[in-house]
Image (tube, grey):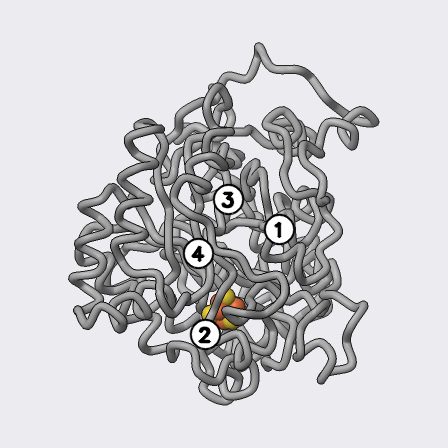
Amino acid sequence: MAPGSPSAPAPTLAFDRIRDPALRPIANRVGEGRRLDAADARVLYATSDLIGLGTLAEFANARRNGDRVFFSANQHINPTNVCILRNTCTFCSFARMPKEDGHYTRSLEEVYHEAAQAVGSPTREFHIVGGLHPKLRLSYYTDMIRGLKERHPGVHIKALTAVEIAHLARIEKVSVRDALVALKEAGLTSLPGGGAEVFSTAVRATIAERKLTGTEWIAVHREAHALGIPTNCTMLYGHVETADDRIEHLTMLRDLQDETGGFLTYIPLAYHTEHNELGEQLGRVGTATTGYEDLKNIAIGRLFLDSIPHVKTHWPMVTPFISQIALAFGCDDVEGTVVFERIYHEAGAHTDMGMAYEGLVALIRDAGKTPVERNSLYESVRSDFSGLGQARGGDRRAALPVVHAA
Ligand code: SF4
């Protein structure tokens, strides 16, 4: 019987690993497949029994996904870093004002040139996000998507956060729905989950004052789901938010998923403190979230978001090493090959900008899991890696990097 196959034996919950008595009633509910509520989530955030928490999340994940871990051969493309919210998203290190040092905007030919690295490589997804440029019109993106599909017909296009979609609709004076329809007709496959940050109004007033509200972010995703465009969802943690803010955020995501079923994966994103105003304000430059926080947010995401099929660990933010451990904390989805990661490297991420395909497979295998390459829609495209190089153990560090920051 193939590990991770639907007929694999049901997992058992190791109650003896749970030390915190406050987790035991929750363990019973998880064992019975019952939904957790906000009070349960508060207990999960308060516990210091990380192993107990991870045990519950690993059980919940194994029941849904077996021991399969999905990854994608993807390539990130950031067409512009010019953003009109550059001065109010205080946590952002990526954006620049239109005339500020370091600003850039790619022509379509430059985008196609960067994407051309997919030719002859296994890339199956372009992940395209950028800033809210005051002058780039919707046609720039629809033309880009059409041009990419012509050049790479087999590659899926996951593009534009809810914030970018709402911005494009506003400058075109069309509805969000019409903007999404135009993008879908051009060849858009799905939406990424960025721009969510933390939905709390108070948190947004501090870190992203002029950004789309949480309710508006949810409305864009609801519209996408209604049009048959699946999306991802995220939460940026580790800045000024409280546990209650996180729980409110997760509840809003779960409510939409209950309504539409359109979310594919949930990705907790770790705030990085370098080169942004918020890091300086908080006196946190040079610090990052801890592995403890990273694993806790993965595990709680898995336990609370019971109707979202996948939970992804983003290795460029938390390191490949924490991502590998996250596979035992409820996570069944790893960020892909990426090729050029810019957004978190502007904020001080010290990881490599991309990871070799073989390195990803080795990372998953070394954690005792079964790698499955997926496309943007989480359809399995490859599960036999027998012909692949066997980078393992001490060799694996050397196998991970593929592209280094300049
Ligand atoms: S977080 Fe997004 S919307 Fe905000 S400044 Fe950065 S690129 Fe612009």
Whole-percent x and y of residue 210? 44, 83
What residue did someone put label 2 on?
84
Image point (37%, 73%), residue name: 252
Q: Which amino acid lies under the numbered mark 3 shown in the image of this protein? A: His
| Crowding at mark 2 (Cα within 10 Å: few <14, some 14-19, many 20+) | some
The residue carrying mark 2 has its beta carbon less than 8 Å from ligand 1: yes
Disc 1 element: loop
- In three-dimensional space, the C-alpha distance between marks 1 and 2, rounded to whole angstroms, equals 38 Å
- In three-dimensional space, the C-alpha distance between marks 4 and 2, rounded to whole angstroms, equals 48 Å
Quadrant that contains the C terminus:
top right
| Crowding at mark 1 (Cα within 10 Å: few <14, some 14-19, many 20+) | many
Whole-percent x and y of residue 78? 49, 51
Q: Which of marks 3 and 1 is nearer the N terminus?
A: 3
Q: Earlier in the sequence, mark 3 or mark 4?
A: 4
- In three-dimensional space, the C-alpha distance between marks 3 and 4, rounded to whole angstroms, equals 40 Å
What residue did someone put label 4 on?
32
- Residue 76 numbered tag: 3
Disc 2 element: loop
Label tally: 4
Furthest residue toward top: 387
Whole-percent x and y of residue 312? 52, 49
- In three-dimensional space, the C-alpha distance between marks 3 and 2, rounded to whole angstroms, equals 22 Å
Judged left or right of residue 298, residue 129 is left
Image point (33%, 70%), residue name: 167
| Crowding at mark 3 (Cα within 10 Å: few <14, some 14-19, many 20+) | many
What residue did someone put label 1 on?
329
Q: Is the residue 325 above or below the residue 93 in the image?
A: above
